[in-house]
Image (cartoon, rainbow, N blue to C red):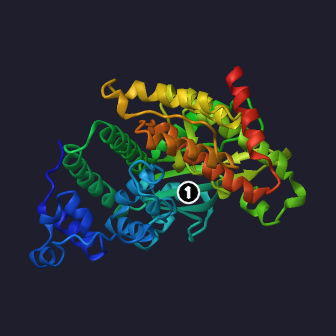
Amino acid sequence: MRRKIKKFELEKIASIMASMGFADILHELKLAHFLPFFKFIKHRKKTGLLPSGNHLARLLCELGPGFSEIGRISASRGDIIPTEFQNGLLNAPFCLSKLSVENPMHVISREFGRKALKEFSSIDPDPFAAHLLGFSYKGVLRDGRRVLIVINSKKQSEALKKDCEIIDWLFDHIFRNLSKPEFSTWNAIYDEFKSRAFFALNLDMVAFRSEAFAGHFFDDKRIIIPDICWEYVSKSVMIQTRNNFPSFADIAIGKFSKDFSKRILSNRLTSAMARQYLSGFFFLRPNLSDFQAGMGNSVVFNNFLCLGFSDPKHNFAFVNLLVSLLEDNPKQASKIFLSEHYKLCVLENCHRFGIVLDSVKGESVSEKLYFAISRAYEGKIIVPFGISQAAESVLYLETALARLDPKFDFKAALLKAVKKIQKR
């Protein structure tokens, strides 16, 4: 049963929003009445001015981890998020100032008992990486295995749970006044947020999902997925094996560059990502630090906290859309958008929407994708959320590979990979 939201919690949110320059949004959402009296008097008139996207990112960070994640999820949706806010939301950092660094040895002892500590020969007390609810640490087991210890902060986890309850209330409040197309988009964002919050709070389920992800590459020895150490997995802790290989980020800046082929690594990562877009599970925002270069130019995947899932019925549509755009077939791309729209929208007031792509502008793959998607938005076409998420993933992948190997022809490699998938 959903907890009843207390008025002071909404008053706190409204007060923070007004103080950081977002009083106009409170008026638009009919939430201004939650402001304390004197702040309501001060902000009762609309200014017509809104702060920058970076200000919005800082506001969401101040409100809590749930609000930050909602911002990241909605960032790529040009149909509901103004362009001036998108970059700030796409690049919004984790709320590191609110994350508490916990002693990993104390957490392991608390979760698995003091005897478990005897199985570790060393644990680095300094964080290796940050995520939404905590940090990851490097360690070594007595049997010689290197591991990565992912830990959720109790305080941050409780903050996310509270955010979820408030966001539930806000979405119930906002949904009442939305048109059908707006409802479809925001409902998809809401569903994605609930999914991400669930996995963020349950690292044991992240472990299960990483093994499901690994199943897609059982026949490809060039793709390596770290093993889960199941004896050290709980809702707030997940330990996986860690390979002592250089990261793609290291290779990009010149370290170990003589030992590996950037072209081969780029090709294999592109091919693996293309398979993901069809399988359902894919890296939401691939970053060079998420991958390592193994023996024989194999690719090692890490950071399974950033996995997304797309409905299988949209996966083929996205792959076909990629082929249409990369082969400069705008009419076929238009048909794909319309077909997906018809599946989501009741066929009424058909004269109010439409899309005609005479050409596909843009040099890069992501430019072509976002040009086509923006034209769809202009024609009031409902773009499935899975497609916009996959497009965002392609944007991050293309940017990352341009850093790794500026000479790499991503467009040709991706087209070859997705056409190979179509033949299967």
Horizontal side, residue 54 vs residue 12: left or right? right
Residue at the spot 44% in from the left edge and 33% down from the top edge: 354
Which quadrant of the rendered structure holds the C terminus? top right
- Measuring from the top left, give residue 129's x and y in whole percent: 57, 63
At x 51% / y 42%, what residue is drawn? 375
Q: Quadrant of residue 321?
A: top right
Which residue in the structure is indicated by mark 1?
Answer: 149
Of all residues, the one furthest to the left in this rendering is 37
Viewer-side residue, 279 vs 394: 394
89 shown above or below 333: below
Name which quarter of the figure residue 66 lies in: bottom left
The 10 Å Cα crowd at callout 1, few under 14, some 14 to 19, many 20 or more, is many
Q: Amino acid at mark 1?
A: Ile
Tell whether 232 sits left or right of 272. Answer: left
Query: In the displayed structure, would residue 300 be above or below residue 387?
Result: below
Percent from the top left, x then y, of residue 361?
64, 46
Question: Which image quarter holds the N terminus?
Answer: top left
How many badges with numbers are in the image?
1
Residue that appears at 68% across and 55% down: 400
> Going 40% across and 57% down the picture, which residue do you hit?
71
Is residue 290 something one can see in this rendering? Answer: yes
Give the camera-side residue of 48 and 393: 48
Task: Tell me if residue 335 comes above or below residue 398 in the rendering.
Answer: above
Q: Quadrant of residue 11?
A: bottom left
Q: As drawn, is 362 to the left or to the right of 135?
A: right
Horizontal arrangement in the rendering, residue 417 relative to residue 85 (left or right): right
Residue at the far top: name it. Answer: 424
